[in-house]
Amino acid sequence: HPALRDLHGLIRARQVWDMIIDNAWNHADPGIVFSDTYERFNPVPKEGKRLSNPCISQDTEITTEIGNITIGVLAELVPEKLPRILSFDGFYYQPTKVWKTGNRELYLLETYEGKKLKATADHLIWATSSTEAKKNGFSVFRDIPLSELNIGDYLQCHRNTGFYTDIIKNITPIGTEDVFDLTEPVTSHMVAGGIVTHQCSEFLDPPGGSCLLGSINLV
C-alpha cells in the first residue's frame, strides 16, 4: 500500500506492464499516460491540465446490425452479446465495451431533417463547417467538437435509405444527465441518434494544448 507501506504480495513487473498494454489495446486506447512524466514535461504548468470525457446520453440510439438500440441498453449487455454497430464507411464493426462514465453537462444538437443528439460539448461530430463546404464542397468531413459547431454547419447522417448530408438547426444546453461511452477499435466511429460521431475518449490536455500523439518527435 503506497501510504501504509505494507506489503500485500509480489508480482513481476513485466506481468503488470503486459496487463496495462493488453487492456489499453482492448479498449482502443492509442497509448498510456504517466501523470508524473506529463507534469515533468508540461510546457505550461501554470495553466493546469484538462480532463476530457466526451460522451452521449443514456437514451441515445446507436445504429446496429439488428436495428437502433439505446446506448443505455447496450451497456447492460456482456461484450459477447453486443451487436455490431454501423460506422461512417457503411460497414458494421464489433464494439468491445459499452459503459456508463458519469454525469455531465449536455447539449442538444438538432438538424433540419429532425435528427437529435444529446452530447457533451467536447464530443466529436463527423462534420464540415458551412465555410469549408462552400470552399471544398462536401468532400472534407472531419471530427469537430460539438462546442466548435455552429448553426448552418453540415453533418453526415444516416436513415433507412443510407447516408446523407444534413444541416445543424439548433444547439442548446439542456442540463446534466448520465452519460455513456463505447469502444469500437477499428474505425472509432458510430452512428448515434442518426448522426455520425466519433466514439468517446479520455485524455490529459492543457488548455489550448495538443494530445500526446500530436507531440511525438519522429526521428
Image (cartoon, grey):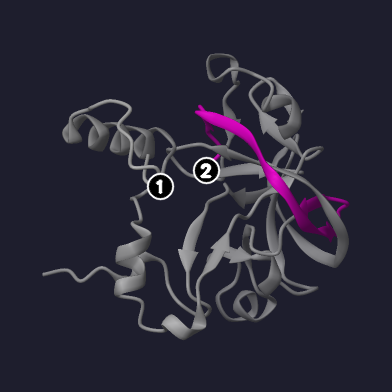
Q: Where is residue 19 in the image (x, y as percent from the top left)?
A: 30, 31
Q: Residue at x 87, y 66 (%)?
A: 172
Given the image, on which type of amino acid does mark 1 rest? Ala
SS for callout 1:
loop
- Which residue is label 2 attached to? 89
Indicate yes or no whether the magenta region holds residue 110.
yes
Magenta span: chief secondary structure = strand
**Mark 2 Cα within 10 Å, few/some/many (few <14, many 20+)?**
few
Q: In this view, does 108 lie to the left or right of 49?
A: right
Q: In which quarter of the image is the C terminus?
A: bottom left
> Label 2 vs label 1: CA separation?
50 Å
* x then y, percent, for residue 123: 64, 58
View extreme (top): residue: 81
| N-terminal-most mark, 2 or 1 | 1
Residue neighbourhood size for the residue with mark 1, other residues' Cα within 10 Å, grouped as few (<14), some (14–19), many (≥20): few
Residue 40 is labelled as none
Residue 175: x and y in percent read 87, 59
Horizontal arrangement in the rendering, residue 175 relative to residue 43 (left or right):
right
Membership of 128 in magenta stretch: no
Q: Which mark is residue 3?
A: 1
Q: Please name the amino acid that badge 2 sits on.
A: Asp
Q: What stretch is highlighted in magenta?
A: 89-118
SS under mark 2: loop
> Closer to us: mark 2 or mark 1?
1
Q: Which of 86 and 103 is in front in this view?
A: 103
